[in-house]
Image (cartoon, helix red, strand yellow):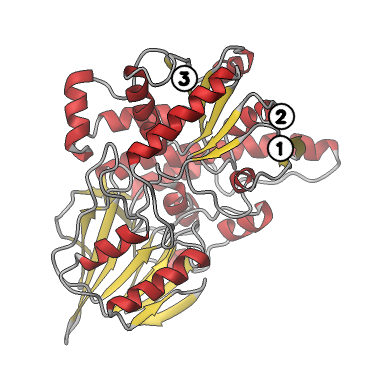
Amino acid sequence: MKITFHGAARTVTGSMHLVECNRQRVLLECGLFQGRRKEAFKRNRNLPFDARRVDAMILSHAHIDHSGNIPNLVRSGFDGHIYCTAATRDLCSIMLRDSAYIQEKDVAYVNKKRARRGKPPVEPIYTTADAEASLQHFVDLQYRRWFEVGRGIRAQFYDAGHILGSAITVLESRGLIKTTRLGFTGDLGRIDLPLLEDPEVPPEPLDVLIIESTYGNRHHGPIQETETKLARVVNETAKRGGKVIIPAFAIERTQEIIYSLHKLTDAGRIPDLPIFVDSPLAINATDIFRAHHECFDDETNAFLLSEHDPFGFGRLRYTRTVEESKAINEVREPCIVISASGMCEAGRILHHLKNNIQDERNTVLIVSYQAPNTLGRKLVERQPVVRIFGEEYHLNAPVEIINGYSSHADRDELLGWLCRLPQLPRHVFIVHGDEDQALPLADAIRKLGVSSVRVPTRGESYTV
């Protein structure tokens, strides 16, 4: 079995790993790389392998850094099945279309500015038509059921507890002499997070494990502390007469924030402010959440029985149209605005940041990981001046950071999950983490007794 790590190698975005076994090529993920615009465009447009020679693809979950380049994969000649869970398929059906739409709209906006400066237009990585064509390749499957991927290759999904429908993959290659079993965490979730079940542990031993490391050297606080900090930020901003601007991934993070705000409002811990969810994608995703109760944990199902809808309450307003989005700028009373994208690289959040970060009464609340060189990371670093749509804006609004909502397991949770496997794998590859997270996690796994632990670089191959 040969594994080549084409993405999310010593970085967090652009997950893409090619497994070659039994004379077949199986791609794990095909995500968009996010970072400096020119570099991201080049890497995303030009796939590092011949898509026509990939026999099948397995997708762990719907986040764009794992699924977002699938339309380009299909446009480049891939003609196989894309295996995932039903919830992942449903989420991708809206997310890939939305990704293409945002690219087209952002490119149109940028091209207007380029035309004024006499510069040639740029093109999106893929179009809405490409996204719709790629959806024809999806095949959805249930957790804990084997399915055939190719000759002598089968796979099985387990609940990763990361986002709705997220899956840990066990890929089994059956040879003449022996069978090799590879595990791939995708993104591993946390224990006791709101909404979802905890991550499962595959019951059979693994020979090889590919594990994420987004927070491989950090620790999350208890979710109760997270909600306390959220209440503090909302209350302090409301007293200043400002707005809380929350860049949030449309999938999972938005629903978690809404759920927490619902509980805090019911408990009287925050004022009854207008709350705007300004993301058509998040609105559509929330409808998909409502349709997949089988993914919820016991606490959320109990809340459903008492409250009926954890994603709709009081002064919560979902805004779909551009006109409704623009109207939020005219709101003069304190309010909360939740908008995508989570790393502030595209979508309506850019307009809300542009209109609000220069006002010191407002607060920018970061509730998710921000990749290097993204606008979100620059806000986390509190750079005094940031560029939005090519223009400079002064960051006068306070920036607050809450990492407790992360749907990624932290260091202890990653190691704890690994130790609950029936036995330690012979080979461990650490991906989907910056070096300051991946390398310390590698040292910790070696101390557990795994001798072959590697942190691959992009393009590196290993045979096991």
Q: Residues within 10 Å of mark 3 (few under 14, many from 20)?
A: many
Residue under numbered circle 2 = 358
Amino acid at the residue labelled 3: Ile
Q: Is residue 278 visible?
A: no
Q: Name the element at disc 2.
A: loop
Residue under numbered circle 1 = 389
Instruction: State whether residue 431 is above or below residue 334.
Output: below
The image shows residue 259 at horizontal and vertical percentages of 34, 28
Q: Is 275 placed left or right of 158 in the picture?
A: right
**Residue 127 found in image quarter:** top right
On-image quarter of the C terminus = bottom left
- Please report the residue visible at 31 percent of the width from the left and 56 percent of the height from the top: 81
Instruction: State whether residue 243 is above or below residue 192.
Output: above
Instruction: State whether residue 262 is above or below residue 408.
Output: above
- Please report the residue visible at 22 percent of the width from the left and 56 percent of the height from the top: 157
Amino acid at the residue labelled 1: Phe
Question: Is there CB contact under 8 Å for labels 2 and 3?
Answer: no
**Pointer 3 or 1: first along the chain:** 3
Residue under numbered circle 3 = 275
Q: Nearer the viewer, mark 3 or mark 1?
A: 3
